[in-house]
Amino acid sequence: MASLQDIKRRISSVKNTLQITKAMKMVAAAKFRRAQLKMAEARPYSVKMADVITAITAGIDRESHPLLAKRDGKSVEVILITGDRGLCSSFNTNALKAADKLIKQLKSDGHDVSVCAVGRKSKAYFKREGIEPLGAWEGLSGGKVDYASATAIAREVIKTYEDGAMDEVYLVYNEFRSVLAQEVITKKLLPFEENTGDIAEDAPVFLFEPSIDSILGRILPKYIEVQLYQALLESQAAEEAARMNAMENATQAANDMIETLTLDYNKVRQASITAELMDIIGGAEAVKQ
Amino acid sequence: MGDKLKLEIVSPDKLVLSEEVDEVTVPGLQGQFGVLPGHTSFLATLDVGELAYKKDKTTGYVFVNAGYAEVAADKITILADSSELASDIDVARAEESRQRAEDRVVRAPAGIEPTIDVARAETALKKSLVRLQIAKERTQQ
């Protein structure tokens, strides 16, 4: 059995870890609340925007704008959004696995796949895999997602798409479901999917000012920005929620460990006291005789 | 169809305003236009400007920085790149940005600083002027 000293040392080391996980849990909880609020505030805009897009693209020729038209080319870009840091259980790994699967599948279908990494973890992953990403963005997780960074990413994506370098663009990210659950989503960003939603029979026919082309030219890129922004916010909230849970579990585990170790410690202590007593009694008996 | 319009203003970071109003004046890219209940549906591109709405004889002002207006018979939805209620405008900040932008617009053509993006400076100037204008109207009420 380990000595008293050893057990004591282990207890104090576990206690230190406990302090850290507890603090990290609190930080993650605070960040999560902020991220969730931001996400909720951004939702009305993206919902309204989706409505408008659905309404205006319903009645027009899909070939009329490059971002709507389908192309037969085989170059595909995959944008992978992860966090910058670890210690959030399977949050990052799930996204990486999903991206890996998608890339393998696209490749086996005969596509040329390029990637764009958002988040330090996805950048590191592609580096390990020996893939050179088209673009890499980091420093966005941990409450630093803002609309401007979504715009910057969107601009790059749209540029490579319009140049004809890419024919399809996919987005892989963690969607926030609840505090306890995230789901990895694979979404086709470009070209715009056909409307799957129902369009009311009596959907109003729109007049456009100045013209449909000029509106599409501005609103479609904007919609890409909004979708990216929403994805970044979802991923951010999901990451903090995952970290909060991971740290909660770690705190729990540390507490359990301290309990077992304290029990061991007491057992060892009692055993040594008993042994000492036996010695003394034995000695006394020997003297008596 | 009622005699009210549902006005909703959303920007990427939040829902700015949601109210039942009587009349809305919107800064369209091709000039201001008014919307009353029962308007035909159309979609317009917006300029940087001031959006005014009337509700029970009171008038509210909102700063709108470009975007779109989706108009239907009983509602109007403004998708703004950014937007602030008159009461949320930071006058000191707008004044500061006006001065900075003015400075840049003046200096750029003189060739003092060729790196200045004149178009951007002009947009910034316009934004700050509109903000200040709206803030002024607010204090006059």
Image (cartoon, rainbow, N blue to C red):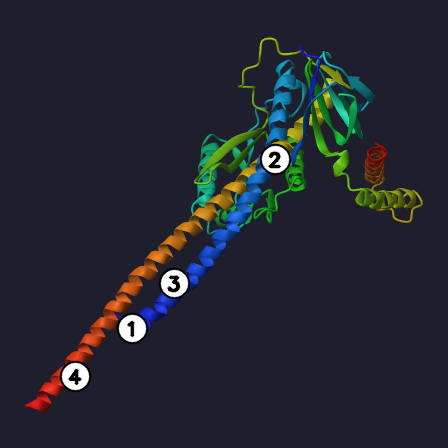
Check if mark 4 and mark 2 are on a common chain: yes
4 and 2 marks in contact (CB < 8 Å): no
Residue at x 81%, y 42% (from the top left corner): B91
Above or below, comparing residue A88 to residue A63 in the picture = below
| Residue B35 visible in the current orientation | yes
Q: Quadrant of the C terminus of chain A?
A: bottom left
| Discs 1 and 3 carry the same chain letter | yes
- Which mark is first along the chain, 3 or 2? 3
Chain at tag 4: A
Left or right relative to A60: residue A83: left
Q: Residue A280's mark? A: 4
Residue B116: x %, y % from top left: 84, 45
- Label 1 element class: helix
Q: Point out the tag, 4 or 3, that comes first from the N-terminus.
A: 3
- Kind of residue sitting beneath label 4: Ile
Using the numbered discs, state the Cα–Cα distance from disc 4 to disc 2 in whole angstroms: 75 Å
| Marks 4 and 2, the one that precedes in the sequence | 2
On the image, the x and y values in percent for residue A230 come to: 58, 35
**Residue A63 on image: x %, y %:** 64, 18
- Alpha carbon of mark 1 to alpha carbon of mark 3: how far? 15 Å
Marks 2/1: CA distance? Answer: 56 Å
Same chain for the residues at labels 2 and 1, yes or no? yes
Do discs 2 and 3 belong to a common subunit?
yes
